[in-house]
Image (cartoon, rainbow, N blue to C red):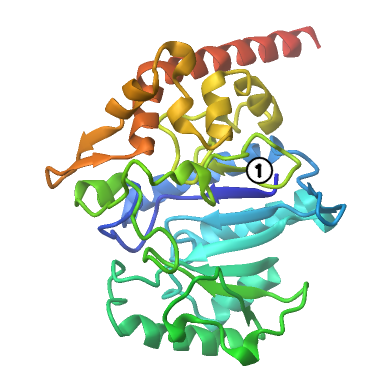
Amino acid sequence: MQSLYWVLTWACHRKCKHCYDDRFRPYVRDALTEVVGEGQKAYEKVLANLPDDLSWFNSETGEREPTHLILAGGELLIDGVREELFYPVLEALKKKYGQRTPKISIQTTGDILTPEILDNCLSRGVSSFGIASIDDYHVGMKGEKKFKFVQNIRALMASRNVKEVSLGAEKDERLKVPDEATDVKPDDATFLFFGAQPDLWIGELWPRGRAFTNGLSNADYKTNFCARWSGGKDFLKFGQAGSEISIEPNGNIFPCCLKTKKPLGNLTEEPLIDILESVATLPAIQAINDGTPNKMGVESGWDAKTFRLKSTKLDGKGRSVENMCLGCDSYFEDILGDQLAELRAQRLTKKSTLESVS
């Protein structure tokens, strides 16, 4: 795969009003132990069912390149998660892949980051840091406060020679990479800033989770998240450019970062390639892979008009929101979820039969 997006835990020190999943929130005492335990229980099996070779072929260079493995939460750097789950996963990755270890990135709000934690991440193989809190939705980041935070992070990263890179499209000069920081070599550790604002990432906000409940999503029917970065487009092209899947703490996998209403399968049960090859037989999954979710129901009698009607819901403020992600949700709930469950049952039956014979 070109990219894997692996959410290790739902635990976070924040409960942001724009978050795309209600499960990302603070957990304390026994609840924290339980939610972190979900990831602890699953990660070794998940790793066992990932391919031994995760590299992908870059047709532009003619070379195979390492997968970009993005580890995220929640917040991986908080107490109760960092030592208990995040660092063990990094060690397990090194043990499985050795010199073939993917390029490891983490997503973090950055406000937990200290020199000691940064050193521990670097020594365990983290080579890229996505500081994902640069917007007005994160507490303490509204208005000018985010720019002071940006300068503090830049100073910390410079102390460890971690180089700044950019997603591009930043309009505010204070968010653009300084000219003196542009000399980045292939083996350099890097960091970048992004957030939920128009010039940094998803300005419209996904129609999901607390963003939907709080009436914050401005995505309309023309906003096709499926065809964007971390959307479903090309997710089936494993071993090629564009291929990416998302993994939840319990091992469930999805074709996009936002996640569909039902998983494609679970990596604690089966190898990734087996799951992808199986679900690829469904026309609706092919439509997601093409970045055209509005066509996913054609084989089941959902014409363009029907899909669009199913793509409208009232948000928490009573507004009528129309977006293809909502239509995708409806199709998974009404039809595709049952088809995926049937395929999963067939795969597991076959797997059990083969294991009993051997």
Quadrant of residue 260 in the image?
Answer: top left
Taking 174 as reference, is 208 left or right?
left
Q: Where is residue 132, by image quadrant?
A: bottom left
Q: Nearer the viewer, residue 28 or 124?
A: 124
How far from the left and from the top, in percent, is residue 284? 51, 23
Which quarter of the rendering shows the N terminus? Answer: top right
- Residue under label 1, please give it: 243
Furthest-right residue in this view: 62
Element class at badge 1: loop
Q: Up-down: is 134 above or below 8?
A: below
Percent of width and height locating residue 330: 34, 26
Residue 168 vertical placement versus 257 (above, below): below
Q: Is residue 159 visible?
A: no
- Local packing at callout 1 (Cα closer than 10 Å; few below 14, some 14-19, many 20+) is many
**Badge 1 amino acid:** Ser
> In the rendered image of this protein, does residue 86 appear above or below residue 174?
above
**Going by the picture, which residue comes out furthest to the left?**
318
Image coordinates for residue 149, horizontal then vertical, percent: 40, 83
Question: Residue, x 66% and y 60% (percent of image)?
Answer: 104
Asked whether the viewer can see residue 301, the reply is yes
Which residue is at a point 69% across and 15% down the rendered structure image? 351
The quarter of the picture where the C terminus appears is top right
